[in-house]
Image (cartoon, rainbow, N blue to C red):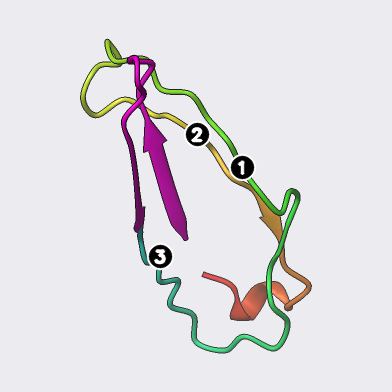
Amino acid sequence: MVVSVSDKGNPPRTSVNTATVRVIVTRNLKSPIFFNETYRVTIPETQPVGSNIISVSATDADPIVSNI
């Protein structure tokens, strides 16, 4: 996943980095399908540490017995 952040300064400062999300399953026959290809969220500077900033959902056609 690519994470891009910027502030509203003049000039704005921007930084881009990657994050790895690993989902471990016993068996995965079908890849999950995310509802959107890109997710964008604005996080206020005053956002409390540890608060939820985005929820992402996907569907998975694998049988329930192979999902964790």
Q: Which mark is residue 48?
A: none
Q: Residue furthest left?
A: 49
Whether residue 63 appears in magenta in the rendering, the answer is: no
Q: Position of residue 24 (x, y in %)?
A: 43, 77
* Mark 1, secondary structure of its residue: loop
34 to 64, vertically: above or below:
above
Q: Amino acid at mark 3?
A: Val
* Mark 2, secondary structure of its residue: loop
> Which residue is tagged 3?
21
Name which of mark 1 and mark 2 comes first in the sequence: 1
Categorize mark 2 by other alpha carbons within 10 Å: few (<14), some (14-19), many (20+): few
Question: Which residue is rendered at x = 54% and y = 38% of the image?
Answer: 55
Categorize mark 3 by other alpha carbons within 10 Å: few (<14), some (14-19), many (20+): few
Categorize mark 1 by other alpha carbons within 10 Å: few (<14), some (14-19), many (20+): few
> Which residue is tagged 2?
54
Q: Amino acid at mark 1?
A: Tyr
Magenta residues span 1-17
The quadrant in which residue 58 appears is bottom right
39 to 47, vertically: above or below:
below
Q: Position of residue 2 (x, y in %)?
A: 45, 57
Mark in front: 1 vs 2:
1
> Which residue is tagged 1?
39
Q: Disc 2 to disc 3, how far (Cα)? A: 14 Å
2 to 28, vertically: above or below:
above
